[in-house]
Image (cartoon, rainbow, N blue to C red):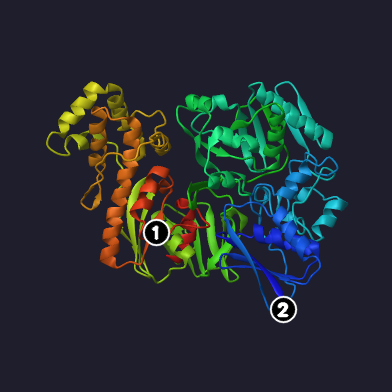
Amino acid sequence: MAFILELHTTSSQNYLYNTVVSIVKTCDIVADISQREGKIICAFASEHENLQACLDTIAQKLPASIFLKASKSYANEEEVSSKTELKNEYPLNLGLCPSCQKEMFDVSSRRYYYPFTSCSCCGGNYSFLHAYPYARQNTSMKFVVPCASCKEEMQSAGLRESHHINSCQECGVPVRLVNKSSERYANDAGSFRTMFEVAAKALNDDKKLLIKTTMGYRLFYKADTMHDDSVLMMINAAKITDHLSLITEEFNALLGIERPILHVTLKNEALKEKLGRNTAYVKYPDDGFCILLGAELQKLGVDFIAYEDADAACEADMLMDYDLEINPQKDMRVFLNKDVSFIAQGERVSFPSHNLKKRNVLSIADEYIGFAKENKMFFDKMQHFDSLHVEQVNVIEGTEEVYHPNQHIFMPEEASFMSVIAEHEVFGEKCVGAYFDEEPSFLYYDGKNVLRVVPPKAFDGKNIIEDIKNLREGSDRLVVNLEKNMPRIYKKLLHLQKKKDVKLFEAVAILLGIEDETMRGVVNEAMKFVGKGGIQIDTHVSDNRFDHAAFLSSIISYQLADVSTSILAYSIFESFGDYFNDILQELKSKTKAQHIVLCGTHFSNQSLFSRMQRNLKMSPPLMNMNYPIGKESAVVGGVYL
């Protein structure tokens, strides 16, 4: 007789599985744990005396996760044999699990205030990896000899079994705090705690603090000096909803072990006024450095702090550093819209990974590669491998190096589109889709090959004023009126024509008069609109391609008519949503496609996605599940082109 516990997850990663396995092994209970088809299936011997204690421990120690969707339990008649082994072939960069966080604040622990605390199921472990196979000698920790207690943990059942970079204060890494006049070191509980106390007080006194965290260099400062590249770190969980307006899913995601960055609505009026917008990118502390700094800031009455990603050369009043080499990943940004969630961009958690259908093809996209390993594909940074033997190499457009005599070039939008097909395993089924990353494009998969039916049209800002003048009869007067009534915007357009590599939404932001002249600035402006509907912006095509001049001309017309900037920004995305829907529905009808696919980072904004969701209500689109929807997924799709 077996008791079955099913945990439903959309992730193929193994950290939740490993957490359950470590608990089961610690409880010394007969169990068979497996992960397949979106489920972690735990079969327990139902009569075992430790069953209830094991289930209680799982409920207590299993971390919250944005990928953990549901659970259920039931009984069956099967006999249970013990099959519970950790999967520890590669490290990940995660927040800290509840057990590790608890240990950092336990005064009797060897890891009290030790910022490198982690286990086999959590922490910034990937940053220390140099090469495979994943073992201590192939990490930055190879020179740190584990003490007897850490060695015993690594060889015993529990969360630190086979934890290759295990350490504590007795054998671990000293940290130094440096300012212009002094330098202090921490290597035990008392000195670590004092160091974080000093750092927190300096921040509270308006100093800037650069920390080499296990997730990379981060520059911390007070939130009243935030700018467009800043992230708001909410350090007091009890006060999060005092400052942010969150739906339940957003709150849970912030505190999940993945610790993503979210774009959310602010409730704090002082922050709104300071930032000039009602939204911000936020996250909750992830690694030991941030958690300990946050704990000391809370004691000073601070609920949040600002930071930005930095490097070792960044100027600051104080530096917290240590003598280990790290290779950090880009943070994961997650998009949430009620019951829909996906990874908008980033590397953490998505990579490395070992999943999907095997092909003897090497895929290369920027610094990432994908290759066949055992019966699946493995994806990670190229720098961790020496040589591989494959039948074919697919490389992303722009790659100059020749890796193989049988080498093929692929486009980023084709590969991102194909990555969705691979994740949903709809090989052989007809699909149409849209890719939106700076420029819109449309693709078709006939069951074998990907075709760019409407390729992206690169935006060329060199002659944009003349293009608008010559668009149609009377368009020249539009430009004259722009120069007369909005001379500052007109001068910026003139300057834009002299720049290289100009993006479409840079021109849009200039026309809207937005200070942050990027797609992000336009998105933030659109989020200010609280109405129910916008106005129609011209998103027509010319010669089967998106017409930039008509699009920008339409925006100028509304600007001259004194339409609110927030309404106009919102309407741009609403109109794009209709544009994508019209073409996708037409392509779907003509090709008899079974699925619609959406990919590209620009789909990760609320205004556009809400419109797409409404338009595609009867045929919900397929999107990436384990990988970002943008260019980072190209290495995945590149395998199957």
Q: What residue does disc 1 label?
A: 620
Q: Is residue 400 above or below residue 286?
A: below
Crowd class of label 1 (few under 14; some 14 to 19; many from 20; radius 10 Å): some
Q: What residue does disc 2 label?
A: 79
Q: Quadrant of the C terminus?
A: bottom left
Report the residue at 86% width, 52% height from top: 149
Query: Which of 639 and 308 lies nearest the eye of the viewer?
Result: 308
Q: Quadrant of the N terminus?
A: bottom right
Q: Position of residue 427 (x, y in %)?
A: 43, 70
Q: Is residue 611 above or below residue 471?
A: below
Q: Quadrant of residue 156?
A: bottom right
Residue type at mark 2?
Answer: Glu
Task: Answer yes or no: is residue 204 visible.
Answer: yes
Q: Position of residue 636 (x, y in %)?
A: 49, 60
Q: Quadrant of residue 243?
A: top right
Q: Is 614 on the left-hand or right-hand side of 81?
A: left
Query: Which of 412 and 58 lies nearest the eye of the viewer?
Result: 58
Task: Answer yes or no: is residue 510 visible.
Answer: no
Residue 129 disc label: none
